[in-house]
Image (tube, grey):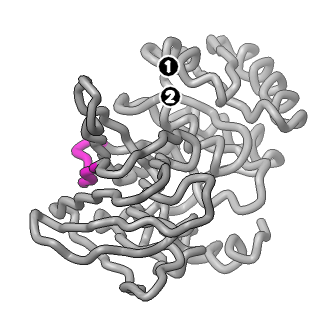
Amino acid sequence: MKQIGILYHPKIEAAHTVAKELQNFLGSRGISVWLCSAWEREKARAQVKDTDLILSIGGDGTILRAAQAVLPGLTPITGINLGKLGFMTELSVDEAMEKLPALLAGEGWIDERALLEAELSPQHGENETPRMFYALNDVVVARGAIARVVYVEASIDGEPLTTYKADGVIVATATGSTGYSLAAGGPILHPQANEFLLLPILPHLSSVYTMVLPAKSVVKLRVVTAHEATLSIDGHINLPLSSGASITVKHSSNTARFLRVHPETSFYGSLEQRLKGKQ
């Protein structure tokens, strides 16, 4: 590897400290290194092109931001965990210096994760082209600041399914099945599965079940509300939605890539500990 980027959580002092330590460690091995806050997406995107690996220092939220800086590119990410759960992270801080040489020597393996593509159609009165987003975790259509339910008309492959009367609706990848979707009562999928989930958030007198959809499915969500709703991509890209807004969600042909060194089976062995917030 010739160049490595380090994206760190700017609100955790230890993250910047670890980032500087890793910069010095990698620099002593003749590797070019750049540092950037994971919150500065466009600044990071401008440096990703010739980068061989991204080190994400923080928790799962930092990895989600790192992925947005990379996608739809193929630069792999390795997460160093300073958070609580760390479902997507690979190394603890204590492991980082020990395991990095193995990764640099090509001893790791690539974990490819499914992505969703969400297309937001122009809303009434807007003279714009549709906007496209990638989601590693989830696409959420939900109520805005006013604590009232929204109506979300859902269809799958052009066939009407139901109208959810709820706080919102989640469309989640297998990776996202251990996040907001799990908190809303959804099942856990193996992280390398291509299926994705459709489920409501706190439904009121409407469907409460979760749909597990095959990768070829196309979900369309249309918002009907007397007040503003919100579109959230991976929890940190948030856009206002007015009544009539339409979002089409489908499995992406692109993937997110993670460089890992632990055995592939470690997901099962660590699942219960991670769910309990232990490392």
Quadrant assignment for the C terminus: bottom right
When the figure is inspected, residue 60 is found, relative to residue 181, above or below; the finding is: above
- Residue 20 relative to residue 105: left or right: right
Q: Is residue 252 magenta?
A: yes
Place of residue 90 in the rendered image (x, y in percent of width and height, measured from the top left): 63, 51
Residue 108 position within the rendered picture, expressed as x and y whole percent measured from the top left: 51, 45
Q: Relative to the observer, which residue lies in front, 278 or 121?
A: 121
- Tally of numbered tags: 2
Q: Which residues are magenta?
A: 246-254
Q: Label 2 sits on what residue type?
A: Ala
Q: Residue drawn 70% across and 44% down?
A: 80
Q: Position of residue 174 (x, y in %)?
A: 41, 65
Specify the label residue 45 is tagged with: 1
| Mark nearer the N terminus (2 vs 1) | 1
Q: Residue at x 75, y 77 (%)?
A: 276
Picture coordinates of residue 44 (x, y %)? Answer: 57, 19
**Residue tagged 2:** 69
Vertical position of residue 53 compared to residue 158: above or below? above
Element class at badge 2: helix
Cβ atoms at labels 2 and 1 below 8 Å apart:
yes
Would residue 268 be counted in the magenta stretch? no
Outermost residue, front side: 226
Residue type marked 1? Arg
* Residue at point 39%, 85% (across, down): 206
Relative to the observer, which residue lies in front, 186 or 242? Answer: 242
Name the chief secondary structure element in magenta.
strand
| Mark 1 nearby-residue class (10 Å; few <14, some 14–19, many ≥20) | some
Residue 150 or residue 198, whichever sits in front: 150
Give the numbered dot on residue 125.
none
